Amino acid sequence: MRDKYLRPLVAAIEMLIGTALTAAAFGLIIVPRGFAAGGITGFSRIIVSVIPIPLSAMVFIANMSLLILGLVFIGKKFIAKTVSISILFPVMLEVFSHHALNSIAQDTMLCTIVAGVMLGVGSGLILHSGASSGGFDILAVTLNKKCNIPVAVVMNICDAAVILMQSLNQPLIQTIYGIIVITISAAIVGRIVTMGAGESQITHLTGIGSLHEPHF
């Protein structure tokens, strides 16, 4: 009986802390430092460079659009796991975007490592809680369901396309730093998600049957 109430509480705390860490990674370091970023946040940065709207607002619009797509083609069960994060993340991103991380601002490589760790731990906690980061995950699962295209293939193509588009309008070094952040975070995500979980549990935790880098 105790576990019945304790597990949902622990999962909710993991999801909240994970979302806060990922939002902080983007708001405090990745976006201010101009590092290339994949996922919906990276895609949104490309859009706001053309259309003058807040990044957090664009992230929210993109996530909501994909949630509607997922609701139509995937179903309520999967989407239920992503709704709260899709709402919380843009709000937290907006809050963190107004605070500069001056203490390590002069050391770019340190910023890169810290961002990668924060993003990895945050995304790992979200997945470990049984939730999904949403974003391109939804598009990938939709295409997998309708066209039998592997989820990892879709997400990797999306991330590569987003990073490539960003690289056209920024110094190469910023793209390299972004790739380092993604590499560090991807390595950490796997370790966090598999904490105390067997193979079958990992599939349940990720919701899509594979471990992957964050796609906020």
Image: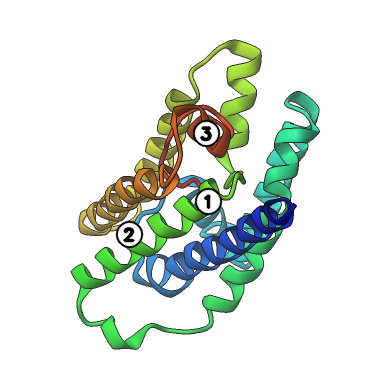
- Picture coordinates of residue 8, whole percent (x, y): 69, 54
Residue wearing tag 1: 216
Nearer-the-camera pick, 75 or 72: 75
Q: Secondary structure at mark 2?
A: helix
Residue under label 2, please give it.
116
The answer for how far apart the CA atoms under marks 1 and 3 are is 23 Å
Q: Residue at x 60, y 44 (%)?
A: 130
Say whether disc 1 or disc 2 marks the residue closer to the N-terminus: 2
Report the residue marked by disc 3: 201
Q: Nearer the viewer, residue 77 or 200?
A: 200
Q: Is label 1 in a helix, a strand or a loop?
A: loop
Label 2 – label 3 distance at C-alpha: 25 Å
Q: Amino acid at mark 3?
A: Gln
**Mark 1 touching mark 3, by CB under 8 A?**
no
Q: Quick check: 40 left or right of 156? A: right
Residue at (55, 57) in percent of width and height: 50
Of badges 2 and 3, the one in the foreground is 3
